Amino acid sequence: MKKKYKQRFAYGIMLVSTTIVIFNNVGQTMTLIEVPFTKTIQYWVAGISFFVGAIWTLYLKGILK
């Protein structure tokens, strides 16, 4: 595989793993403080988690280069 594809694959893994970690932590926190975790809230949290994960991945990409 070319280096370019390996980097994109690595960034994709970083984005997905960061999104999962953020979503999981927010979900556990909401459950802990007993906030109802409805489908609409889940979608919003997932979207925000993906956005934050993308920002974090771009930040790390800039640092690693």
Image: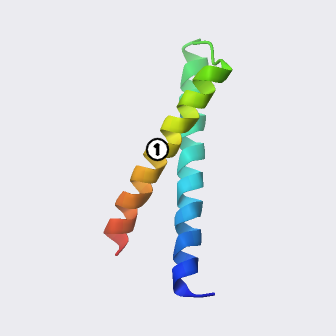
Can you name the residue that lies furthest to the right here? 39
Give residue 55's position: percent from left, percent from top. 40, 51
For residue 36, side relative to residue 18 (left or right): right
- Residue identified by numbered label 1: 51
Q: Is residue 37 above or below residue 5?
A: above
Which residue is nearer to you in this view: 25 or 43? 43
Against 34, residue 13 (above or below) is below
> Which quadrant holds residue 9?
bottom right
Q: Amino acid at mark 1?
A: Phe
Quadrant where the C terminus lies?
Answer: bottom left
Residue lying at 57% horizontally and 62% vertically, measured from the top left: 12
Count of labels shown? 1
Residue 53 in the image: x percent, y percent? 48, 49
Q: Quadrant of residue 31?
A: top right
**Residue 45 on image: x %, y %:** 54, 31
Residue lying at the far bottom in this picture: please name it.
2
Helix, strand or loop at mark 1: helix
User: Relative to the observer, which residue lies in front, 41 or 24?
Assistant: 41
Residue at 57 percent across and 36 percent down: it is 46
| 63 vs 38, nearest the viewer | 38
Q: Quadrant of the N terminus?
A: bottom right
For mark 1, does the 10 Å Cα neighbourhood hold few (<14), some (14 to 19), or many (20 or more) residues?
some
Q: Position of residue 14 (x, y in %)?
A: 54, 59
Q: How is the image coloured?
A: rainbow
- Tell me which residue sits at (58%, 22%) in the image: 41
Using the image, determine if residue 7 lies above or below residue 53. below
